[in-house]
Amino acid sequence: MVLSRLVRAALEEDLARGDLTSDAIFDPDTPGSARLVAREALVLAGLPVVRAVFAAVDARVQVEALAAEGDALGPGDVAARLRGPVRSLLHGERVALNFAQRTSGVASAARRYVDALPATTPCRIADTRKTTPLLRALERYAVRCGGAFNHREDLGAAVMLKDNHLAAAGGVRAAVERVRAYAPHTTRIELEVDTMEQLDEALEVGVDIVMLDNFDDASTREAVARVAGRCLVEASGGITLGRVKTLAKAGVDVISVGAITHSARAVDLGLDWGS
């Protein structure tokens, strides 16, 4: 449902008034073929979106996958072969590429962070809600294609007490007690902490997860030692590729990285004519 709405909206944006160029040159039934080609090293994500775009344009267009979601492709590798009316291939080209370049860019960014983890660590890389408006479902899917994990999907998916919650509620204990009285018993409580004092309060009231917000490496190690397995520990804020191995070795359970989505660069995928 989400995908179909996105595809319809994107096609309306690009094709609502037709295609003056393609419609002038080609008859509706003139056959054609093209290849979806990687023009740089990337992790593939988004073939289902490509299929959905062309299915919405013209059911006669066939998309044959030649690579799997999550595959690492190099320059010149062919991800898919497309066959159908020339007009239809050209009508859907830009929209399909815009989606696939974005999702493959997110998957590629996620894979870089996953690959930076030590080989045997149980620590996992997760995304955040810092996603492109209306594209969250696609970007979360791309994160999984890259081998990382998803954080909460939306504000209703999990309890996460952040700095503004604590400030408005009057502190850690007050916020946690109110949430515990309100939320279902099946819901974990995650608390973002900025200081060791807040961490100690979190451990006293018994939260399920603490998020260490912008802790440096030494403070992270100290925090993990203080927690001593009493709850899960998540590191977030200012996470760079160079810090991933250090944080994992410090013993955190989750490293959440907003950059996987908010700063992912669209990769270079092209639609090359011919079979």
Image (spheres, rainbow, N blue to C red):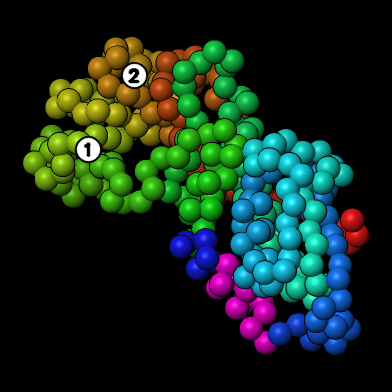
Describe residue 162's horizontal placement relative to residue 76 as left or right: left
Q: Earlier in the sequence, mark 2 or mark 1?
A: 1
- Which mark is in front, 2 or 1? 1
Describe residue 220's horizontal placement relative to residue 44 as left or right: left
x, y percentage for residue 150?
45, 39
- Pointer 1 residue: 187
Which quadrant of the view contains residue 87?
A: bottom right
- What is the crowding at mark 2: few (fewer than 14 residues within 10 Å), some, or many (at least 20)? many
x, y percentage for residue 85?
80, 72
Q: Which residues are magenta?
A: 7-17
Q: State the SS at label 2.
A: helix
Look at 35% across and 51% down and name the residue there: 154
- Pointer 2 residue: 223
Q: Is residue 10 magenta?
A: yes
Q: Is residue 170 magenta?
A: no
Look at 50% across and 31% down and name the residue there: 125
Mark 1 residue type: Thr
Q: State the SS at label 1.
A: loop
In the displayed structure, would residue 151 be above or below residue 197?
below
Look at 29% across and 12% down and name the residue there: 228
